[in-house]
Image (tube, rainbow, N blue to C red):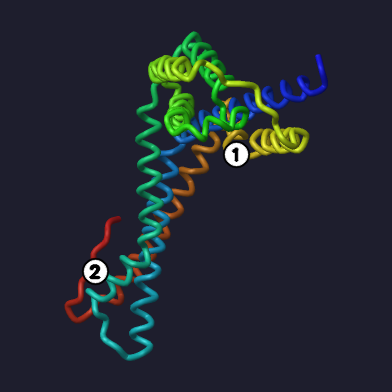
Amino acid sequence: MSEKQEKYEQYEKLLFERDKYKKQAGEYLREYIREFGELMTDVFRKKISCIEKKKMISYCQIRINRDEMIDAQAMNEYIQHEMEEYNEQLAGMMHNNELCRKGIAISNSDVMQIKRIYRCIAKKIHPDIYPGTLDLPVLSELWVEVMDAYDRNDLKALEELEIQINSILRELGDDVPVVEIPDIDDKIKVLEAEIEMILSTDPYQYRFLLEDEEKVQEYKVELKEELEEFTRYEKQLIGILKKYVAGGAKFTWES
């Protein structure tokens, strides 16, 4: 085998490894959210409730220091604006929790089939190997669908996509030549660095927590203790905030 062919095969192998580890990292993230997402969301919800009440207290104190009336409507509008980003984060967490709860368990045989179909498709039209894929809208769009189906472990979608792609390639004469990979040595180094980064950071590192049931239970205890701490702090803030209620002004919040 020539050195050129060896480099090409090494590059191709690293591409598949990177995609495999990225997929595994996504699976660890989904499992992490399934395991801890609800508790983490409860903690964050209580945290932003405390932040909201601190901002309300600050708003009231500033008005008092200026010898100004507290306008409840103006305050609510101000707080709503200040809390917008936090509430968007909370909505995102709740959405992710729901998606992960709906995740479908698949068999080992399906996992193997998914890997086989993905590799078969990728060897034909992976844009990093065959840049021409990006020049054909129909193939580039299908490749996006392939990556999405692969990430979601959607075997049925991959099977259907493989049929579509093979049909298109036949129409094109099934002529997808092996192309020259410019700066292949540099690209190999980049792939190796990407793989190292994936393996050494979250969410891939969640695996070491998820694989240890004792650590899983310990982390749940930590989250519950954090939730209790924020709950106590929230009650203190509510007590402080009530002191500012005067002259018929009323503040409402969820506790």
| Residue of label 2 | 251
Q: Kindly identify the residue that appears in the image at 31 percent across and 65 percent down.
A: 80
User: In this orientation, which residue lies closer to the viewer: 248 or 164?
Assistant: 164
Q: Kindly identify the residue that appears in the image at 20 percent across and 76 percent down.
A: 249
Q: Position of residue 172 (x, y in %)?
A: 48, 20
Q: Is residue 92 above or below residue 72?
A: above
Q: Position of residue 6 (x, y in %)?
A: 78, 20
Relative to 33, 125 lies left or right: right
| Residue of label 1 | 202
* Viewer can see residue 105: no
Q: So how many labels did they put on this image?
A: 2
- Nearer the observer: mark 2 or 1; the answer is 1
Q: Kindly identify the residue that appears in the image at 36 percent across and 90 percent down.
A: 66
Q: Secondary structure at mark 2?
A: loop
Q: Position of residue 227 (x, y in %)?
A: 43, 48
Dots 2, 1 in contact, CB < 8 A: no
User: Identity of the amino acid at label 1?
Assistant: Asp
Relative to 138, 181 lies left or right: right
Q: Earlier in the sequence, mark 2 or mark 1?
A: 1
* Viewer can see residue 227: yes
Given the current orientation, which residue lies at the most extreme left position? 248
User: Identity of the amino acid at label 2?
Assistant: Phe
Q: Kindly identify the residue that appears in the image at 51 percent across and 28 percent down.
A: 27
Q: Is residue 246 above or below residue 14?
A: below
Q: Measure how far apart labels 2 and 1 are at the Cα level.
A: 41 Å
Q: Is residue 86 above or below residue 5?
A: below
Q: Secondary structure at mark 1?
A: loop
Characterize the local packing of mark 2: few (<14), some (14-19) or many (20 or more) Cα atoms within 10 angstroms.
some
Residue 129: mark: none
Classify the position of the C terminus by image quarter.
Answer: bottom left
Q: Position of residue 130 (x, y in %)?
A: 59, 28
